[in-house]
């Protein structure tokens, strides 16, 4: 999924968390929201590494983040509650990865050798030969994905009204970054049409 879907979905989940646990720390909420979006920054590595699909990096490994979350959970109960922040960041990333299972899926382990888990609608057999503009076009011209994005956007509005005011500035900054990125993707689509 694109960063916008991750942002909207995690904002909705965060709203539910605050509805149930009104004393949930705002910094933990911001870390949860940030984790659900920032993990896609591993795409930067694709400029330097032969494997261009960033979902084959360790940062997009569901098993890696589940193991790390378990470690932080144990440390939280044995050492200090400071590890809560790391745990919520990891849980945001896990939410991100679960949402990534909808489109092109994720590798079971971060390696091309291992089979991919496909639960999505945009399955491609030969992913390595596709350009970034191909992925963007495939995503934004898919009717199911557009409908899903609109549904997530609508639900995120509910989440927006449930989060505490301390979290609104950080949330707005992350949202602004996301929408600037969407604008960049739209420019790529427009340039490819010329």
Image (cartoon, rainbow, N blue to C red):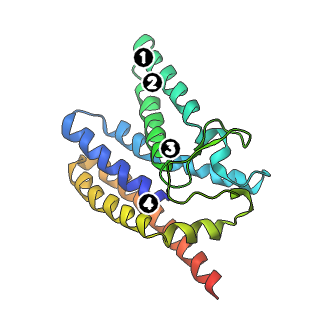
- In front: mark 1 or mark 4? 4
Nearer the N terminus, badge 1 or badge 4? 4
For label 4, the SS is helix
Could you give the CA–CA distance between mark 2 and mark 4, rounded to whole angstroms? 28 Å
Q: Residues within 10 Å of mark 4 (few under 14, many from 20)?
A: some
Could you give the CA–CA distance between mark 3 and mark 1, rounded to whole angstroms? 27 Å
Q: Which mark is residue 4?
A: 4
Mark 1 touches mark 4? (CB < 8 Å): no
Residue 65, percent from left and from top: 54, 32
- In front: mark 2 or mark 4? 4
For label 2, the SS is helix
- Residue that carries the numbered disc 1 in the rendered image: 80
- In front: mark 4 or mark 3? 3
Please indicate whether residue 116 sits to the left or right of residue 145 in the image.
right
For label 3, the SS is helix
Instruction: Give me the residue at 24% from left, 40% from top.
Output: 18
- Residue that carries the numbered disc 2 in the rendered image: 83
Please indicate whether residue 28 sits to the left or right of residue 187 in the image.
left
Instruction: Give me the residue at 54% from left, 36% from top.
Output: 62
Q: In the rendered view, would you say 104 is above or below 60?
A: below
Residue 14, percent from left and from top: 31, 44
Mark 1 touches mark 2? (CB < 8 Å): yes
Could you give the CA–CA distance between mark 4 and mark 3, rounded to whole angstroms? 14 Å
Residue 98, percent from left and from top: 46, 43
- Residue extending furthest toward the top: 78
- Residue that carries the numbered disc 3 in the rendered image: 97
Nearer the N terminus, badge 3 or badge 2? 2
Could you give the CA–CA distance between mark 1 and mark 2, rounded to whole angstroms? 6 Å
Nearer the N terminus, badge 2 or badge 4? 4
């Amino acid at each position: 999924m694109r960063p916008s879907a991750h942002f909207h979905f995690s904002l909705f989940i965060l709203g539910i968390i605050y509805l149930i646990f009104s004393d949930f720390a705002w910094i933990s909420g911001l870390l949860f929201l940030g984790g659900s979006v920032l993990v896609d920054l591993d795409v930067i590595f694709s400029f330097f590494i032969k494997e261009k699909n960033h979902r084959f990096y360790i940062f997009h490994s569901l098993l890696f983040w589940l193991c790390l979350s378990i470690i932080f959970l144990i440390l939280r109960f044995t050492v200090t509650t400071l590890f809560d922040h790391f745990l919520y960041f990891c849980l945001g990333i896990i939410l991100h990865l679960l949402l990534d299972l909808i489109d092109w899926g994720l590798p079971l382990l971060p390696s091309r050798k291992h089979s991919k888990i496909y639960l999505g609608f945009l399955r491609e057999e030969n992913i390595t030969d596709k350009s970034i503009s191909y992925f963007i076009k495939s995503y934004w011209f898919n009717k199911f994905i557009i409908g899903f994005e609109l549904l997530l956007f609508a639900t995120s509005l509910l989440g927006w009204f449930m989060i505490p005011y301390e979290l609104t500035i950080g949330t707005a900054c992350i949202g602004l970054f996301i929408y600037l990125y969407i604008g960049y993707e739209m420019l790529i689509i427009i340039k490819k049409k010329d």
